[in-house]
Structures are given as structure tokens and as C-alpha cells.
Image (tube, rainbow, N blue to C red):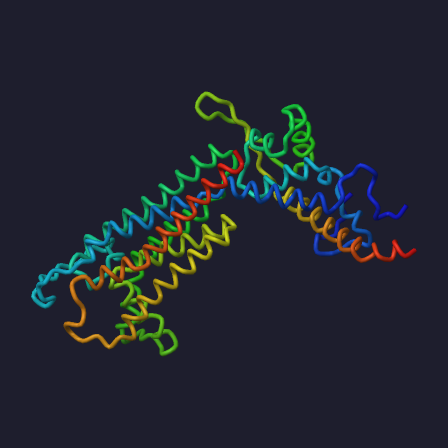
Amino acid sequence: MSSESLSPGEDSPQELLASVTALRRRARAARQAYWFPLLLFGLLTVTAGPLYVESTEPAALRAGPGTPALTGLGGHFLEQSAALGWYWLAALVGGYLLSLAWYRRHGRRAGVQTPTRAYVIAGIAGTLVGVALPVVLEFLLFNTAVGSSGATRWLVGPLLGTANRGMLPHLVIALGLAVLAHLERSGRLWIVVGLYTAALVAVNAWFQVADLQPGDLHRFSFMLAALLPAPVLLIGGGVALATTKQQHNGYA
Amino acid sequence: MSTEDGPRTAPAYPTNGLDDTVHQRHRLGILTIAAESERVEVAYLRGALELTAGNLSRHLTVLEEANLIQVEKGYHGRRPRTWIRITQEGRRALLAEITALQELLRRHGRTAPDAETG
């Protein structure tokens, strides 16, 4: 008998590997619950919509109060940048903490827990970076002593534009969801993150390359830009929820 | 039993890479599910592996004694709950086992036609 032979009655490698694959798939389906953060952040983005609307008053005539340091997420271009900054600070921190609570609850109910610590850390850290980033970018772009070189200017300029339009929170959401896709080991979530990021980049690239003249933008332009990536999250979350229910019924 | 070689180094005979503790079908199942999650509840394992409480407990004891899993006991409300967490050693052992099984399958696939003609 060859040393590579298996004892009679013992499972063959093929059977064992098939069993491993089936168990892994089943456990993954039971613990995955990313529909909740997708819908949550999609709804939080939609709720922020009114804060992106500009009044009809010319921008030059508006009073320009200084914005508090913690409202960096709201940018500087918008009439309600400060309110938007506060909103996103609370929404992002609250959203990540709520997601954590959701995953804990789901894990207890399903009996299989997803490791979510890295997701929450990435989200909260991303939020804090988002608050401080506009100041750093402005310093890099406008401080002649430091002066961003040609190599970094292509990144600093568009990123500051994104920040000023109040769209850094979208990047923070994309970052958190990318970490979650890695933790969930979900190809579908990676697709949602890819589409969301692509929508985000496309919207901001349009602002960057369009030769905008005074009067080209109307009062809803920034709101439309901010809301455009949201359907990706809402549709992705809805499809994930429907799939989860289907799988649950299948195993029940 | 497992060798000192890492899972990337294929042993001369793939069966040398099989660890009796891990190779058993249900223990392999427990480690697979535990590796897929941060931690898994005993009730889930019982359902997924279709084992009785006594049988599952025996397999868990073997894995815990080999330091491949950690058992955490707690309460959810008034209900007692037992959770299983895979250790780093457990992850390594699982990877080594799967690598050995894949290698075994690959070699069998390569040698099967020869065996038939011989």
C-alpha cells in the first residue's frame, strides 16, 4: 500500500475539500450583514442633501463667518458648510458606531461573528483625517514656503476641490466600506465599493476638468454632485438585503 | 503528523503534512468555520456539522488541548453561550492541512491514469 493511500472508510481529500468549501460558504453567508451599513450610509448621504443646496443670493454678498475647526468635513464652498461639517462629523462617527452595534447584534443572532474592529477603526480614523485634511491641503497648496511640487499638485488641488465641495465624507465612507469588503471577504461588496468610488471620482473629475464660469452652477449643483453616488449604496444595500433574506429562507 | 515545514513547502509525501488532530472531518469543519469568523457559537457549529452536543464537546476538547482554539463562556441575557475562537496556531494548522489535501489531490490526479494502466 502506497504511503499516499488513505485508510478505508476515511474521507477522500476531494470530499474533505468539498466539505471545507461548503462549510466556509455557509458560514460566510450566515455572518455577512453588509446590507445594513450600505443602506445606512446611503440614507445618511440623502439626508445631507438639503445642506448642499445654495441660496439664490450671490456668493459674494454672503457674510463669511469663519468655520470652526471641527467642521472641516463640510468644506468651504457651500453656504451651509459649517452645518454640513457638524452633520457629517456626527453622521460618520454615529454611522460607524451604529454599524459596529449592528454587527455585534447580528453575530449574536447568527452565531457567527464578523471581525469588524478594523472597519470601525478605519472609519473613525478616516473621519478624523477628513476633519484635518482641508487645513493640511490648503497649507500645502497655498503656502509658498512649502509649495507643493508639480508631482503632488495634481493630487492636492483636486483633493482640496473635493473637500471644499463637502465630499470628503464620501471618501471616508468609501474607505470604510473597502475595509469592510476585505473583512467580509465579499466580492459583491467589492463591486459596490468599486462602483461607488467610480461615481465619486467621475463627479469630482467633472468639476475639475469642466471650465466653469460664474453662473454655470445653479443652486442645486453641489447637492446633485453629493447625491449622485448615493444610489449605488442604496441599490447595493437593497440587493444585498434581498439576497440575505433569500439565503436565510434557503437554509431555514 | 505535521512537519516543521511551512505550508508552502510541499513535503515528499503529502500525507506527512496531515495532522491527525486537524484531519478528522468534524474537527476540520470546526476549524474551517472558526477561521471564517471572529468567533463562532457552539450552537451554530452543532447545526452546521450536524453533531450531538456530546460529540461536538469531545472534538472541541481535542482542539482546545492542542491549542488550536480558545473556548469563551458567557451569557446573552440569562442564556449561557459558549463561543469558539481560532488561535494563530489553529490557522496555521488549518492552512497546512488544506495545502496537504490539495497536494494529495493533485498527485492522485497525476498518478491515477498510471495506476489504471499498471
Residue A209 position, x and y percent, is 29, 75
Q: Is residue A161 above or below residue B19?
A: below
Which residue is farthest bottom?
A150
Residue at position x 73%, y 48% from top?
B101
Specify whether B94 is left or right of A124.
right
Is B3 on the left or on the right of A134, as rendered?
right
Left or right: A81 in relation to A237: left
Report x, y in % for residue A128: 33, 53
Query: Which residue is at the front of the view, A236 or A104?
Result: A236
Task: Give residue A28's position: percent from left, percent from top.
Answer: 54, 43
Query: Which of A70 and A231 lies nearest the eye of the viewer?
Result: A231
* Residue displayed at 15% across by 74% down: A214
Q: Residue furthest top?
A: B78
Quarter where residue A84 is shown: bottom left
Q: Nearer the viewer, residue A224 or A85?
A: A224
Report the label total: 0
Residue at position x 45%, y 40% from top?
A245
Position in image of residue B96 (x %, y %): 70, 48
Which residue occupies the extreme right position in the image? B118
Judge whether A157 appears above or below A127 on screen.
below
Q: Which part of the image, by quadrant, shows the N terminus of chain A? A: top right
Residue plotted at (65% across, 29% down): B51
